[in-house]
Amino acid sequence: MAFMFDGTAADIDRVAEPVAALAEFLRAHPRLFVLTGAGISTASGIPDYRDLDGGWKRRPPVTYQAFVADAATRARYWARSLVGWRRFGSARPNAAHAALARLEEAGRIEALVTQNVDGLHQAAGSRAVIDLHGRLDEVRCLQCERRIPRDVFQRELERRNPAWSEFDALAAPDGDADLDGLDFTTFAVPACAACGGMLKPDVVFFGENVPRERVERAYAHLAAADAMLVVGSSLMVYSGFRFAREAARAGKTIAAINRGRTRADDLFALKVEGDCAEVLSFVEECGRG
Ligand SMILES: [Zn+2]
């Protein structure tokens, strides 16, 4: 069953029913496996990729194959990243991140697996976090595995490309930015200072696999959990969808808070179509009442 909830007080009965059902779901399942996606970070100023039908809202992100194979693609990626990072790097957690941190504090979260690379769950105080797709605040050398903080790399990008520091553009979920129609050919991409190798943000790109150990760790937590809660993800990407499929296979109840269609709609026992922060805070009030 699916409910619509637009966060207004216009139809109190319509709002109360799904939230009460979600509160009941939380009461019935003490240990949750939580999976979050881009929808939880939109209120922090990081836009999501998908429209309400689960289709691409923007140009699809760069693939791993294109990034490693083509210097021009890397130049374009880092130029857009230089501009996007200022906004992305200063994003702060919102009320939905805070609500999940309180849920963990109350001993209710077995693990929080996020598809986001923004680190906002940890910034809100969550500790049981598995960053499925890595973190954008680190850069890794593909040759010697050396890691450097993104902030350090940002200063190096700006030092080598002073003209690009002037631009401001709309940031994307992966820290990318919209900079159409610009010439990227003069953009200077720094190599690893230790070995001269190729640097890449320490995130899982499209076309790249999530490290096996990370997936196994998440599966182990799912097995130990009573139920699964999806927050702000359309589950269009297999790396997240597989956990819903596994939960269903294991007979665990799945509830979801998400605006719009998801790939796992037919697996959900309960779906609330609303704003993540508003729904979670209403559910918290239900829990207290
Ligand atoms: Zn290196």
Image (cartoon, rainbow, N blue to C red):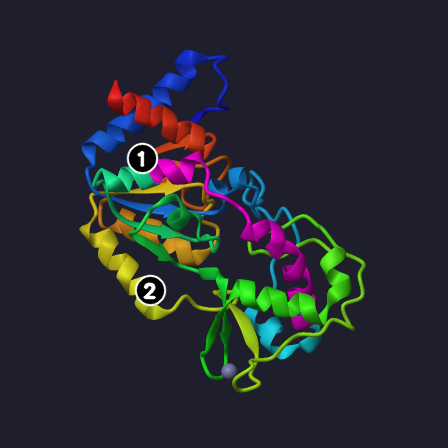
Q: Which residue sits at x=34%, y=69%?
A: 212
Amino acid on which the number 2 mark rests in the picture: Arg
Residue receiving disc 2: 214
Determine if residue 253 is in view: no
Label 2 or label 1, whichever lies nearer to me, is 2
In the displayed structure, does residue 200 sit left or right of residue 278?
Answer: right
Q: Quadrant of the C terminus?
A: top left
In the displayed structure, does residue 109 sit left or right of residue 118?
Answer: left
Q: Closest to the observer: 75 or 240?
A: 75
Q: Position of residue 264 (x, y in %)?
A: 40, 44
Q: Residues within 10 Å of mark 1 (few under 14, many from 20)?
A: some
Secondary structure mostly seen in the magenta stretch? helix
> Quick check: 178 above or below 277?
below
Asked whether 80 falls inside the magenta stretch, the response is yes
Q: Which residue sits at x=65%, y=61%?
A: 82
Q: Residue furthest bottom?
A: 195
- Read off the magenta span: 74-100
Q: Position of residue 235 (x, y in %)?
A: 44, 48
CA separation in Å, label 2 and label 1: 27 Å
Mark 1: secondary structure: loop
Disc 1, ligand 1: is the CB inside 8 Å? no
> Quick check: 42 above or below 140?
above
> Quick check: 150 above or below 274?
below
Mark number, residue 269: 1
